Image: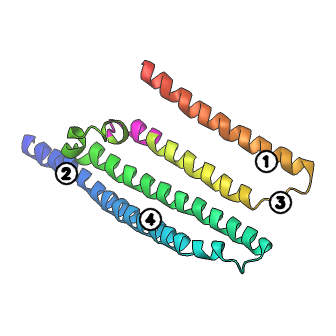
Amino acid sequence: MKTLERIFESILWNSRLIVLVAVVSSLLAAIAMFFLASVDTWYLISHLGDYVSSTLSPEGRGDLRATLITHVVEIIDGFLLATVLLIFALGLYELFISKIDEAESSESAINVLMINSLDDLKARLAKVVLMILIVKFFEHALSMQFSTSLDMLYFAGGIALIGLALYLSHSGDKQADSH
């Protein structure tokens, strides 16, 4: 019976290695997102010459400026999403497979990548997802048309809710540090 128990526990313990599928997949997706955001950055930079063109009308310049700013917001969104995927891959690896020796010896990674529990991983991911949502709100705000004062009130309410979310996420950090 002890031999069967030992074999079963060994299989059970080694089944955690299936998490490597999620780690590798998340890492590949992060690399893809970093690539996409980098290509978008190159595209943005390549179109800056159009903005300087003397043949561009003031209305055309305003439209191009709005388009370029929207692209900047999309680039930020892409890099943030890549960061979420990277943190997720590193966190899963550290939680289920092994501590990353390089991360433990690196001073720059101590605060960002040291994940001790699933709650720790969720908290780090939640902060980055909150930033993605803020960037998306900003992206929509750029194209928003205010036709009534109620539209402005909704927009102000959205900004207030963002401020509240940031305050609550920051106050949660202070409470966790005090414990």
Secondary structure beneath dot 1 equals: helix
Of labels 2 and 4, the one closer to you: 4
Tag 4 residue: 33
Of labels 3 and 2, the one closer to you: 3
Is 68 in the magenta?
no
Amino acid on which the number 3 mark rests in the picture:
Gln
Amino acid on which the number 4 mark rests in the picture:
Met
Q: Residue at x 78, y 59 (%)?
A: 144
Q: 59 and 99: which one is in front?
A: 59
Label located before the other in sequence (3 or 2): 2
At which x and y percent is residue 96?
27, 46
Amino acid on which the number 1 mark rests in the picture:
Phe
Tag 3 residue: 145
At which x and y percent is residue 60?
75, 75
Q: 167 above or below 78?
A: above
Label located before the other in sequence (3 or 1): 3
